[in-house]
Image: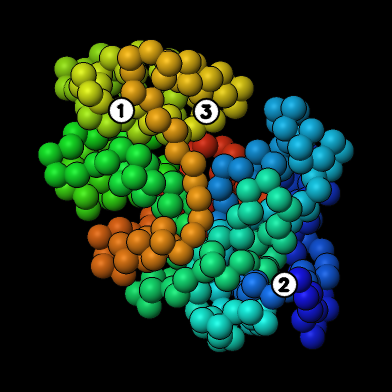
Amino acid sequence: MTITKSTTSTMKAVVQVGYGPPDQVLKMQEVDRPPIGDDNVMVRVRATSVNTPDWIAVTGIPYILRLQSGLRRPKTQVRGTDVAGVVEVVGTKVTDIRPGDEVFGSAWAGSQATPGTFAEFTVVPANQLVAKPLNVTFEEAAASVMSGITALIAMRDVGKVGPGSHVLINGASGGVGTLAVQIAKALGAEVTGVASTKNLEFVRSLGADHVIDYTTEDFTLSEPRYDVILDNVMNHPPSVTSKVLTPTGMLIPNSIGNSGGLMAGLLRGARAALLARGSTNVQFVKCEVNREYLDALATLLRSGEVKVPIDKTYQLGDTADAVAHMLGHHARGKVAIRA
């Protein structure tokens, strides 16, 4: 593959210099712009957002994850995958995107190192970008990507949600939860959202038909039964949560755990996998980024059926604060970063 360099050699980026608290390990630095491959696009970042993998990578906990990411410091030093911005340069094989286009998408490349989006510029595979809807801000577009695609896959593809489906979303006020509520409603489902007292009206405003205050009510002891449960919190053992499924219902665990910490969430995820070996229908969501999903998400955003709630927007220089905000597990909706 032919590699070319952009004409300007440097940019500002938030570089992770080690593992630990965000304010100690995330530093704004001048770095080289990433190279552009034939099938890639350089995007001038207008906005990005913080996702769970970002704060996990910053803290480096649990330590076993460092075996893959780097023992003393991460191999990929610029975090971030979601992006919305303006095309700066395109690779020689890119024919359907042009400099000046407003786009959104993801630099996510699975386990491979990526340039990261907490920066002034990033490089993204052309097949992971689509046109940004005109009625959506750069911040909203960027904040929709990972959470929106995860919610779309969970509701439409895995859960097969449709008219008449009864869906419960645990963690309905978080990044994935807020979008899953709206996508499930767009698909015709009757939706119950579980959230804290202060977020009940917020979840109702997203379209939830019913809300449950987890501070006063345990949904696993409730009378209703659900065809699909999307569990973004996993604060109950999966075997307990599954008791409020219909006989043909499906449990979709989608969290490494907010309640009880990261390790507790990982253990509950493992228990859910074991539960799947029995009679309970347990399905997991794998977030994949491609144009089909991005186009479907763009259609929902363009129509207004789905809006992206942003809890707070930070400037690029305040990225450490943005990650810390996400790390606190109290963000209502998404945390955006304006570059």
Amino acid on which the number 2 mark rests in the picture: Gly
Residue on which disc 1 sits: 250
Amino acid on which the number 3 mark rests in the picture: Gly
Q: CA distance from mark 1 to mark 3?
A: 19 Å
Residue on which disc 3 sits: 257
Q: Nearer the viewer, residue 80 or 126?
A: 126
Q: Nearer the viewer, residue 64 or 128?
A: 128
Residue name at image x 45 percent, y 20 percent? 272
Residue 158: image x %, image y %? Answer: 35, 39
Secondary element type, mark 1: strand
Secondary element type, mark 2: strand
Does 258 appear above or below 318?
A: above
Residue name at image x 75 percent, y 64 percent? 13
Residue 108 located left or right of residue 225: right
Counting the numbered discs, the total is 3
Q: CA distance from mark 1 to mark 2?
A: 42 Å
Circle 3 packing at 10 Å, graded few (<14), some (14-19), many (20+), is: many
Question: Is residue 194 visible to the viewer in this orientation of the structure?
Answer: no
Residue on which disc 2 sits: 37
Does 177 appear above or below 227?
A: below
Which badge, 1 or 3, is on the more N-terminal residue?
Answer: 1
Q: CA distance from mark 3 to mark 2?
A: 37 Å
Circle 2 packing at 10 Å, graded few (<14), some (14-19), many (20+), is: many
Residue 277: image x %, image y %? Answer: 43, 16
Secondary element type, mark 3: loop
